[in-house]
Amino acid sequence: MDALNIAREYDTVQYIVIKIGEEQYGIDISYIDNIVRMQSITRVPDVQPYFAGVINIRGEVVPVMSLRLKMGLEPDEYVNKTRIIIVKLENNAPIGLIVDEVKEVVTLDETSIDEVIRDSKVDETYINGIGKNGDTLISLLDLNAVISEKDNS
Amino acid sequence: MDVSQYLGIFLDETNEHLQTLSDQLMILENEPENEDTINEIFRAAHSLKGMAGTMGYKRMQNLTHDMENVFSEVRNGKIKVDGHMVDILFQALDALEEYRENISENQDEGTNDNEPIIKELQAILNGEAGGGDAAPAKESAKKDEAKDAAKEEAAAPAASGDEGKWNDIVLHEPEQHVISEAIKNNSKVFGITVYIQESCILKAARAFLVFKALEEMGEVITSEPSVQDIEDEKFDFDFSLYFVTEAEIDKVKEAVMSVSEIDHVIADVIDMDKAKIASEDDEEEPANAHTEEHTETAAPAAAPPSTSNAPAPAAKDTKGGDNKKNAANKPAVNRTVRVDIEKLDVLMNLVSELIIAKNSLVSFATSENSHSGFNEQIEYLESVTTNLHESVMKVRMVPIESVVNKFPRMIRDLSKKLDKQMELHMSGEETELDRTVVDEIGDPLMHLLRNSADHGLEHIDLRRERGKSDVGQIFLDAYQDGNNVVIEVRDDGNGIDTEAVKRKAIERGTITPEQGETMSEKEIIDLLFLPSFSTAKVVSDVSGRGVGLDVVRSKIGALGGDVSVKTKLGEGSTWTIRLPLTLAIIQALMVVVGGEKYAISLGSIQTIEDVAEEDIKYVEAREVINLRDTVIPIIRLRDILGVETEKPQSSNMVVIIVKKGDQLAGLVVDELIGQQEIVIKSLGKYINCSSRLISGATILGDGEVALILDANVLI
């Protein structure tokens, strides 16, 4: 673990910048398997409300999660820019995240990433850092927190 | 010595040899003079002994060695095969089987020396020799006796040696070489045992850090368990290693202790003489009395030599406790499938064809060909993928032989135990099934065979009275039938006495006498499959193991198959198990509910009915229909699945009657699409279907995902 952190200090990390509502989020590019256009999602009954259903990615059945619903925002409105980002954490199965728009890829080094200011009122956060790219701020998504099953809302 | 990588092969081959031994012994029992059989047995016992020795399983080796001795005498014509001897040999086989089980569970053969069996084997050897035959026989028997005595003595120190620490590590040639080189160069060689705190969660990570710290100051020669096992966390809370370094022992200990969550560490300079002896002992034949004596003195002293005595006894104690836990923690061996090389060749060919097909499609996309060419390519691709799929499935298939082979032996034992004469006839052992199914099918089949032997076949008096031959016949036939594999267990025994079953059921309050009056024969037989029923108490008074037919049914059901029985009183019964060829593909009925497509396994569907709305009745506020005198509850899938779209207007409903055991239910769907072969895909662990209604998903021809409904949950 220590060795990993040390290595990171000198590394730059590439993030894919996505938009949800008016906010921009960054997803570590190394976790991204694929980005696909919106396609017909098969609804699965009786599941967590933020799961939109499952889709077919190259013959695999992949669950799709609505980031908006997971974050407690308005339900998605599927438009031309809507994308499903397929992420894969280490050895876990892939999972799809519905986002409003995929904007660009940015490269951030450690110096331009700030710690998250922990709000004592909110005990849970899906963000593990704030990246500064020029004038814009990018909230860096903590994918483990997003995907993990802590809250059964 | 790291032999863990060979463990899988060892277990597979042990299985094969044990099977051969069992088969040949059965033959030998009937034809005691058959030389081929004797030779075959001798060879199998010999290979088994060699393998057990290589893997360091001493007790197994001892036992096989004695068996081999007996066979060797038989082969030389010095001993005659008799019933008693075969019985003992079968006992020895069981003991070997037990060792194998232990090894496959926790990589350790266990502590049972099986002395009684060894003594019996010895007695066979001695007894014949004492009978006063030729001198050589006597001599060899004596020699064996001596060997055995030496072995028994050796067994004890060997066992206590297990409780040592780094002295357990067996040194190979190269490692010995490295150590002696190191000593020549004035480096120090330490044996180190590291104990990790039991509260530690990431043991492998800690162990890794220990290795890293050590490697900075020297070289780790070998470790126990192996580095690979440590990385995979296949160890308890301690591991031992040999370490070559120039640093002082305190520094080494300090370096190890600097890693957090290390409980304590024991390190000492190793004594090459003793280490070497330990390794020789392991490599050589234990029967060699010379080394035995040597070990006897060496083994007790095999604990850490001279310099620091204090930590040694303490370490020994803790290790004893740890050892036991070790056994529980080690994971079982991975399951493997032995694949015929031809099947792999076919796969390779198909993959190459697939690539060719892809390439033609690519070139087609860039050229301006006609439309027909495109279709041609698609068809080609289609045929390749279909074949590819079939071949991959075939790789997963194994013959049921591996399971049914042990049955002749079982029937032989049962025959003795129940004092009934019986014969087992098997056919279709080469029928192939998915590996996962084959692994599970053994127990149910054994239940059914025991059932036939115990309750089916009559006693000899009754058989004579009925004009049947003295020897009861049991048949086990397997064959493929379309997409199913059928396994039949048949006997020419008594058959099921339905009246007796009915009486018992009424007695136990399972059914009322009125119900009993109206029940068909089939319904009564179905009672046998109820969990509360034990056939042992129902059909006959023959005591013994109550055979849980409900377990048979639920196990077969879990494999996607079903079991049925046909019987005729006084003539026998036939149990039929029907299994899908593979679990990954099922035949399903595709239906539409609220615009969404769902698949229902054809296996659970009884019939499909067209029911008018007005035929729905209410019982206890639940919707039911009365179908051919059976009241069936109705489940509206629209409600269950939470469909939001408008319901199509129609006065008639499509109702799919599904069954689970004896229970029926009617599922109301909007529309039927038709039957289809579907490939089952898992939904993965992220999605948490609270009602467990959905057992999986499948991808349809157009790329759309359809969900598979588990009808069993609905009923």
Image (tube, coloured by chain):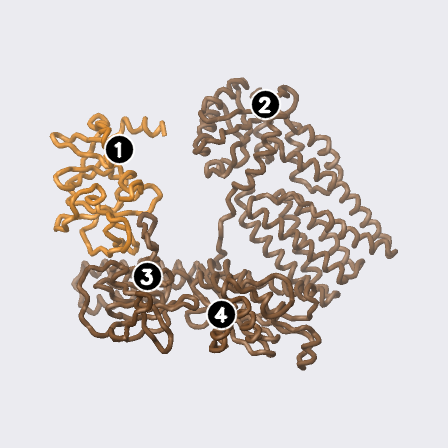
B331 to B278, vertically: above or below: below
- What residue is disc 1 on? A123
**Mark 4 and mark 3: Cα distance apart in space:** 32 Å
Q: Can residue B446 be seen in this view?
A: no
Name which residue lies at 63% across and 67% down: B454
Question: Tag 4, which secondary structure?
Answer: loop
Color used for chain B?
brown
Name which residue lies at 65% across and 56% down: B44
Counting from the top left corner in percent of width and height, residue B101 is at 59, 50
B373 to B256, vertically: above or below: below
- What residue is disc 2 on? B268
Counting from the top left corner in percent of width and height, residue B650 is at 20, 73
Q: In which quarter of the image is residue A117?
A: top left
Color used for chain A?
orange
Query: Callout 4 environment at 10 Å: few (<14), some (14 to 19), or many (20+)?
Result: some
Does label 4 or label 2 sit earlier along the sequence?
Answer: 2
Name which residue lies at 22% across and 35% down: A140
